[in-house]
Amino acid sequence: MIKVENVVRNYHAGETVVKALRGVSLEIGKGEFLSIAGPSGSGKTTLLNLIGCIDQMDGGEISIKDEKISSMNKKEKTNFRRNNLGFIFQTYNLIPVLTAYENVSFVLSLLNLGEKEIQDRTMAILKEVGLEGMEHRRPSRLSGGQQQRVAIARALVKNPEIVLADEPTANLDSDTGKEILELMKEMNRKHKTTFIFSTHDKMVMEYASRLVMLHDGQIQSDERR
Ligand SMILES: Nc1ncnc2c1ncn2[C@@H]1O[C@H](COP(=O)(O)OP(=O)(O)OP(=O)(O)O)[C@@H](O)[C@H]1O
């Protein structure tokens, strides 16, 4: 479903060029639960941002569902993201003035859906991620793990085929991190959503059914478990 072919990404910082990705090739199938791992600076975020259509590559190609990302203009990329991708971030990125319910329903309000459908889908996904009864709390009244659950609900409420998660447990203690991974895995099994998550944490890698290790902008190993 996702085909990454010989992708190159260079960052220019003054006179110096940082070769963040140096020819990465990878095929990812529907329903995979894949971790992109590797040390700090190895290119994990860069690769996720390219697959997520939020950055531009300097060479190579990425196709998602047979659509070439490099041939899309800005508007097409925005639409493609809206229809196919969900995002989860290390710092949750919730809107602080909105409640858990509003943070999730907001995503659906951008689509052309009726009030009742928005309400039903939002309540159902918040229940699935274990937040029943907490719908009207703002992020400041939720723990880190609960905030990440809201973010997972927000990513999944549109039923995207692909969810990209950049270091989703980096700000959580290890028990809460495990709970979040269990939840992601359950959503992967139940909805057949493809999950691609980055980490440098060994415990997090253990959860992946496929582990792609990056080193200095190149794939060092790619193993299925
Ligand atoms: N906007 C930028 N400008 C210049 N260099 C950058 C930029 N973003 C990333 N880099 C560099 O590109 C390389 C890859 O960075 P990237 O963030 O993809 O790595 P990472 O594996 O996600 O690291 P971390 O685990 O620390 O988040 C690093 O050397 C980084 O310093």
Image: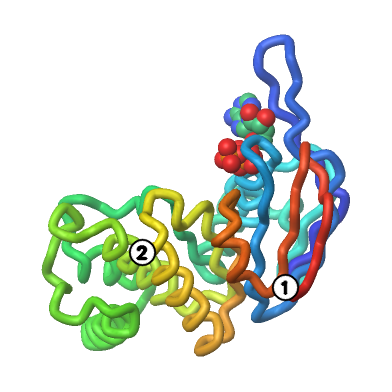
Mark 2 vs mark 1, foreground winner is: 2
For the question of whether residue 114 can be seen, the reply is no
Q: Nearer the viewer, residue 219 or 81?
A: 219
Q: Label 1 is placed on what type of residue? A: Lys
Q: For numbered disc 2, what is the local secondary structure?
A: helix
- The residue under the point 48% across, 83% down is 186
- Image check: 85 left or right of 37? left
In the rendering, at what x and y percent does residue 131 appear? 23, 76
Relative vertical location of residue 43 with respect to residue 219 in this rendering, above or below: above
Name the spot of residue 167 as percent of width and height, x first: 51, 52
Q: Is residue 152 left or right of residue 42?
A: left
Quadrant position of residue 179: bottom left
Badge 1 element: loop
Crowd tier of the residue under label 1, counting other residues whose Cα lies within 10 Å: few below 14, some 14–19, many 20 or above: few
17 over 118 or under it: above or below = above
Determine the image quadrant of residue 8: top right
- Residue at 53% in and 70% down: 83
Tags 2 and 1 touching, CB below 8 Å? no
Q: Quadrant of the N terminus?
A: bottom right
**Side of 122 relative to 84 (left or right):** left
Expressed as whole percent of the image width and height from the top left, the position of residue 154 reads: 36, 68
Mark 1, residue position: 65
Q: Is residue 140 left or right of residue 85?
A: left
Query: What is the spatial separation of the Cα atoms under label 2 and label 1, in whole angstroms?
Result: 33 Å
Say which quarter of the image contains residue 196. Answer: bottom right
Look at 47% across and 57% down and name the residue there.
168
